[in-house]
Image: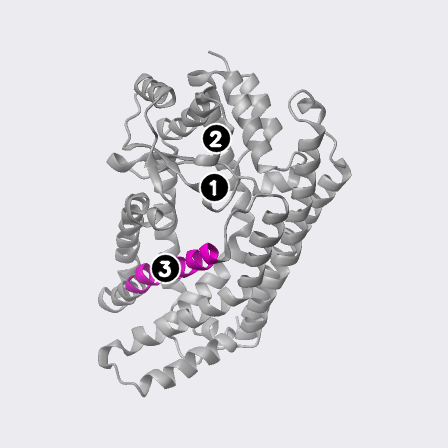
Amino acid sequence: MNPTTILLLYLALAGLDLLWGVFLAYLNWRSVRSAGGKVPPELARSVSKEEAAKAGEYSMARLRFGLLEAPLTTLPTLAVAALGLFGLLDAGLGGIVSGWGFSGLHDFVRAALFFVVIALASGLISLPFSLWSTFGIEKRFGFNTSTIRTWLFDGLKGALISALIGLPLLALLMAFMDATGGLWWLWAAAIFSLVNIALSIIFPLLIAPLFNKFTPLPAGTLADRIGELAARLGFRMRGIFVMDGSKRSRHSNAYFTGLGAVKRVVLFDTLISSMGEDEILAVLAHEIGHEKRRHVLKMTAVSILLAFVGFWVLSILMGWGELYAAFGFAERTKEAIMLIFALVSGPATFFLGPLFSAWSRRHEYEADAFAARAAGKEAMASALLRLNKENASNLWPHPLYAFWNYSHPTLRQRLAAIGKVEG
């Protein structure tokens, strides 16, 4: 296959991926518009007309935003790839770094600068959309509580953390490529899998607190009832923490993070202020259900498997000279094949998205059923309705859009499943 054919195939796949995503978003937008803010019959006793109207307006705004954002952030990447500008950037940086010396660090410095420039360019393209989303749509619907200062510092801290983690990992990967021969991918996959596990342990302890405050749930009836629930379900954890989510948004949520002895459940302060104790216990039981059904362990195992497959494919692509030429690279540099792999992997596997979405939805059904048995069906259903109201979530998603993209079942699907839970 010659370079031109490879490039055209990539552009066709990437274009198909983009068009399919836009088509699904359009179907979803049309579904919401057709509903006209009317309360779905199944939710007539649970959702007010005002709540439905807000959910419809908010969903429409988010979908219009997505229909504009997706093409305007994807097409520049396709244009740069088609014009061979990635290759020109790599060659130009190679010439600059050669004049600096660096001895044995030449290849790493060149690769690091290459990815830093791309990250900065990507950030600049995404910047106006992030601003619009946060201080336009979210503010208009009363969700945003962040300030420009907080938003800027979040971005800077995120970039710094990415660099502090990403650059050493880049150096490690390049070292494996040089030192371990043809089986470098096997060693790299094993080490990087361990690194990912370590990061999942470190994140709640060291990284998340850089962005939010996490305080132990205060003593009181809620803490006592949570302790009783955890003891009854045999759930051991580091603790229940309250996160100051209201610092940035009025959206509410809860999540489970960490592994082993550092696993913890985090409740947004907005969730605690908007829910009753029975509902909070149901949300917590849902999170415990994920742990009891070993969902985190299963997802970790699959991510490790995918890491091995990904590094193996990367090792095969490294020797394909026409692939480098297709994207404008004159040399077979390590950063070139890494970028090409990153560009191609998404469009080449986008059709697998529904499989992972379906798997995730199955986990959510299982966690809902666990919570319904542990905390009561009425409490779990009430908690879901409350979350949907507080987040103004879409009440009328198009079935195909939900099938393809939703990691959680729709509200109506979850309520129907909870109603069928026995015992």
First in sequence: mark 3 or mark 1?
Answer: 3
Examine the rendering and report whether any part of residue 130 can be seen: yes
Tell me the amino acid under the disc marked 1.
Ser
Circle 1 is placed at which residue position? Answer: 246
Tell me the amino acid under the disc marked 3.
Ser
- In this picture, residue 370 sits left or right of residue 192: right
Examine the rendering and report whether any part of residue 319 can be seen: no
Query: Foreground mark, 3 or 2?
Result: 2
Res. 119 image quadrant: bottom left
Placement of 94 over or under 117, stated as above or below:
below
Res. 294 image quadrant: top left
CA–CA distance in space, label 3 to label 2 = 33 Å
Circle 2 is placed at which residue position? Answer: 273
Say which of 169 and 188 sits in front.
169
Sort mark 3 into few (<14), some (14-19) or many (20+) by Cα contacts within 10 Å. few
First in sequence: mark 2 or mark 1?
Answer: 1
- In this picture, residue 385 sits left or right of residue 60: left
Asked whether 153 falls inside the magenta stretch, the response is yes
Say which of 366 and 244 sits in front.
244
Image coloring type: one colour
Tell me the amino acid under the disc marked 2.
Ser
Helix, strand or loop at label 3? It is helix
Q: Main secondary structure of the magenta part?
A: helix
CA–CA distance in space, label 2 to label 1 = 10 Å
Placement of 198 over or under 224, stated as above or below:
below
Residue under the image location 50 percent in, 66 percent down: 122
Say which of 120 and 182 sits in front.
120
Sort mark 2 into few (<14), some (14-19) or many (20+) by Cα contacts within 10 Å. few
